[in-house]
Amino acid sequence: MSLERLRVLREFADRGTVAATAAALSMTPSAVSQQLKVLAREAGVALLEPDGRRVRLTDAGHALVVRADEVLAAMDRAVAEMAHYRGSPRGRVRVAVFPSGGALLLPRVLPALADSGVEVVARDEDVPPSETHRLLADYDIVLTHRDERAAPLAGPRIASRVLMREPIDVVVAPTHRLAGRESVTPAELADESWLSVRGGFPVDDVLRSIATVTGVEPRITQRLNEFRMIEVLVATGYGVALMPRHAVTHPDLSVLRLSGVRAARLYELATRPRADTRPAIATVLDAFIAAAAAIPD
C-alpha cells in the first residue's frame, strides 16, 4: 500500500468528506476519490460505503486508518531518528492552545524554545474539548482543558496527558454582598445572576454542578467566552461569574473559593499516538511540562 494513499485515507478520516480532504491536501475531489479506490483495491476490501449523498468509512476503513496512523508515525520516527544523527531536534511543530491556557503558558514555553532549533507555530482555538480530535487533523499538539470530573480524552487515534490542575473560583463586584469573603457555598449563590461561557467548556460544567447541589437552575444572563469581558461586566455589578484562578486579572474583583463542589479544570496535552517519539514534538511537550510546573498553586 502506498504511503501517500494512506495519508489520503487518514485525512479523509479526519475531515469527514472528500471535498474537505481535497482542500486540505491541495488535490481535486476526483483525485482523492481515485486514490481511495486504488487503496481499496490494494487492501482487498471496501473502505468506503454510501451515507446519503456522501460516503463514510466502513469498519475495515476505520481499522485501516488506525494502522495508517501507525505506519505514518513509524515513517515520522525514522525521519526524526535521522535528524537526531544530524544534531539537535529541528523542525516545525504546530500547536493549538485554548486562549486563557495559551496566555498562561506560552510566555514561558516560547522563550524556552527560542534557541532549540524547533519552530513553534501556535494558534488559539476557542473550542470545547470535544473538538480535540478534529484539531489533531491540523496540529501536532493540542492544549485543551476539561472539568476535572470529566473523562480524559481517549481513543485509538489520540494520546493525552494531564499537564496541570487550575481551581475555578467565584468572582464578584467589590460592592457585592459577598465581597471580601474567602469562600462561598453553592447555596449562598442560588439567587445570583450569572455570566458564563458557552456550553461544553469546563467553567459551564462547574456551574451545572452548582445547580445539582442547590437544585436551582442558574439564571444565566449572558454567555461570553472572553474572560476579560466577563471581568469588566462583573466589576460593574452586572452579575457574578466563575473564572479559572489564573485567568483573573481585574484588580477590583473579589475572588472567593467555592466550597462544597469540586471546582477545577485540568489542562491536557493531546497528540497522535507515539507522536512524542519525534524529537521536535517531544521538545515542545517538555517545554509545556516545565512551564506548567513553574505556575504557582
Image (tube, grey):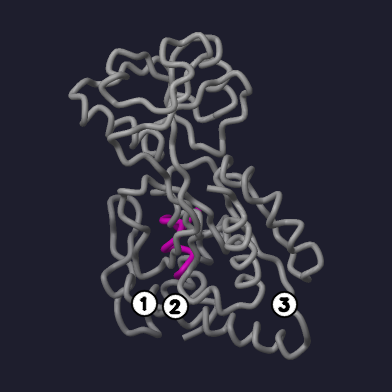
Residue wearing tag 1: 64
Q: Residue furthest right?
A: 115
Q: Nearer the viewer, residue 237 or 63?
A: 237
**Kind of residue at disc 1:** Leu
Residue wearing tag 2: 68
Residue wearing tag 3: 89
Classed neighbour count for the residue bearing mark 3: other residues with Cα under 10 Å, few (<14), some (14–19), many (≥20): some
**Dot 1 lies on which element?**
helix
**Dot 2 lies on which element?**
helix
Q: Which residues are magenta?
A: 9-20
> Is residue 248 depicted above or below 285 in this figure?
above
Classed neighbour count for the residue bearing mark 1: other residues with Cα under 10 Å, few (<14), some (14–19), many (≥20): some
Q: Is residue 161 left or right of residue 121?
A: left
Counting from the top left corner in percent of width and height, residue 248 is at 57, 31
Q: Is residue 76 left or right of residue 5?
A: right
Q: Earlier in the sequence, mark 3 or mark 2?
A: 2
Q: Nearer the viewer, residue 47 or 135?
A: 135
Check contact, mark 2 vs mark 1: CB within 8 A.
Answer: yes
